[in-house]
Image (cartoon, helix red, strand yellow):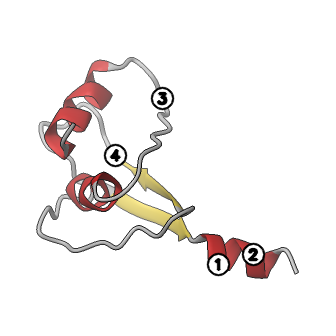
Amino acid sequence: GDPPDVWAEIRSLSLAQVLLASHEPLCGRLLAYLLGCPPLDVEFKKGAIARIDVEPSAAGPRGSLQWLLTAKLAEGASK
């Protein structure tokens, strides 16, 4: 799918939280879209995870990035 389709699916769910799993290039494009900035170029590294808070009742996503954790950062934290 593409980011607008994913956003439509998120909005259709009656859940407080949703976990999405995917791979590039959708992850980077979706992250930018959910932040309300589709032209943003996000390189979503393999094994990364992010938290974005969005208001699903809004017509368009205007998310807030809460955190972004790469596999490299997680590996360093476990040492």
Q: Secondary structure at mark 1?
A: helix
**Which residue was labeled with disc 2?**
75
User: Could you say which is closer to the camera, residue 68 or residue 59?
Assistant: 68
**Label 2 vs 3, first from the N-terminus:** 3
Mark 2 touching mark 4, by CB under 8 A?
A: no
| Residue projecting furthest to the right | 79
Q: Quadrant of residue 4?
A: top left
Residue assigned mark 1 = 72
Foreground tag (3 vs 1): 1
Q: Secondary structure at mark 3?
A: loop
N-terminal of the pair, mark 3 or mark 1, is: 3
Q: What is the C-alpha distance between the residues marked 2 and 3?
A: 29 Å
C-alpha distance separating marks 3 and 1: 29 Å
Res 60 → quadrant: top left
- Where does the N terminus fall, quadrant-wise? top left
**What's the residue type where badge 3 is placed?**
Ala
Query: Badges 2 and 3: C-beta atoms under 8 Å apart?
Result: no
Mark 4 — residue?
Answer: 54
Q: Position of residue 35 (x, y in %)?
A: 26, 59
Q: As shown in the figure, which amino acid type bears the numbered disc 2? A: Glu
**Residue drawn at (35%, 20%) of the image:** 13
User: Which numbered disc, 2 or 3, marks the residue closer to the eye?
Assistant: 2
Between residue 13 and residue 16, name the one nearer to us.
Answer: 13
Q: Amino acid at mark 1?
A: Lys
Assess whether mark 1 and mark 2 are in contact (beta carbons under 8 angstroms).
yes
**Image mark for residue 16:** 3
From the viewer's perspective, is residue 47 above or below residue 57?
Answer: below
Per the model, the C-alpha gap separating discs 3 and 4 is 10 Å
